[in-house]
Amino acid sequence: MAEVGIVIVTHNSGPEIGPCLEAARRTGADVLVIDNASDDDTRRNVARAGVRLIANERNLGFAAAANQGFAQLDCPYILLLNPDAIIRTGIGSLRDACASDGVAAAGGMLIGEDEKPQIGFMVRCIPSARFLAFEALLLNRLWPRNPVNWHFRCLGLDYSKPMPVEQPAGAFLMIRRSAWESLGGFDEAFYPVWFEDVDFCKRILDGGYGIQYVPSAVAKHTGGHAIRKLLLENRQLYWYGSVLKYSAKHFTSRQEKVVCLAMITGSFLRMVLGISLRRSFKPIAVYGKVVRLACRQLFARRQRSAEVLSVPWV
């Protein structure tokens, strides 16, 4: 049995998956691809690379596919890797970090097409209700260096040094299997994508365990290959829907309502801007659905499911 496994979730990742698999196989890890009903040449490219594939007949969502992969591998350490991420170094330093006492997960350095670290993406803080409200209200876009956004995106850190962090990017994240088992895996309610990795990191921290950033493990990351293929309407609904699920799960009732109200207000602002800039009424349909989602949650009876976070796994 390999000590380290790699799980790669794909969905129409044909152009990206070849280089990703080539680099992943060089690490010596047990590589497994979970494909969520791709209709391009993703599966043929995986077969050509000689990597084990589980082909889902429908899109189960990222969280469910990741859980599927973890369940199939017996390795004590599993690297969650995006198909648009190409490992540049060994991954032993990530394994060593995960093996440290009290550590549940470790993320490496992601570099972009320009070979520079993807600062603001590869490591972030757990999002607060204030940050999500700022995001919904366009404040982070209009004033990107505001203190709330600066703190969330960890813009003042020295990324040349290893350190404890809150939320490494799920694109290149190694997780101790026992932590995944103890926490019940990724929450599949975050469907089909967004915030499943944020929620998982939050639950790790709430359980009193640590997450490390390891700059000696490096991967080149293109970013957003699957997201760009989504229709604008679906993209907005998926993102805002996951924000609402996260808010209901982790925020107080007052904080949740703040996020809902900010989302409603911000959606009307985006409608006006979208109509003006695109000279189209399509944004009304897109953001109208977001408003309905937020209103439904704003006035719904709050039901928070209890979670057990104290199960020992180290």
Image (tube, grey):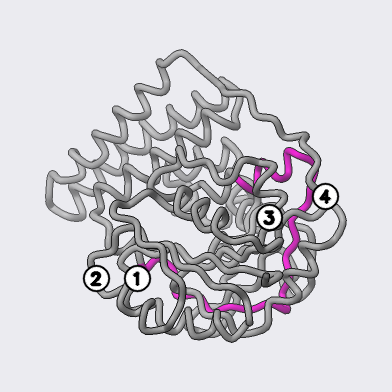
User: Pointer 2: residues within 10 angstroms few (<14), some, or many (20+)?
Assistant: few
- Distance Cα–Cα, label 3 vs label 4: 10 Å
State the residue in front, 170 or 266: 170
* SS for callout 1: loop
* Left or right placement of residue 297 versus residue 282 in this view: right
Identity of the residue drawn at 62% across and 76% down? 29
Disc number for residue 314 = 4
Residue 15: horizontal and vertical position, in percent? 33, 79
The residue carrying mark 2 is 40
Nearest to N terminus: mark 3 or mark 4: 3
- Distance Cα–Cα, label 3 vs label 1: 26 Å
The residue carrying mark 3 is 177
Residue 82: horizontal and vertical position, in percent? 48, 67
- Distance Cα–Cα, label 2 vs label 3: 31 Å
Which quadrant holds residue 129? top right
- Residue type at numbered disc 1: Ser
Whether residue 226 is visible to the viewer of this picture, yes or no, is yes
Q: Quadrant of the N terminus?
A: bottom right
Q: Is residue 210 magenta?
A: yes
* SS for callout 2: loop
Check if mark 2's residue and mark 3's residue have beta carbons within 8 Å. no
The residue carrying mark 1 is 13
Nearest to N terminus: mark 2 or mark 4: 2
* SS for callout 3: helix
Magenta span: 200-225
- Distance Cα–Cα, label 1 vs label 4: 35 Å
Identity of the residue drawn at 45% across and 75% down? 222
- Residue type at numbered disc 3: Arg
Residue 105: horizontal and vertical position, in percent? 71, 58
Nearest to N terminus: mark 2 or mark 1: 1
User: Pointer 3: residues within 10 angstroms few (<14), some, or many (20+)?
Assistant: many
- Residue type at numbered disc 2: Asp
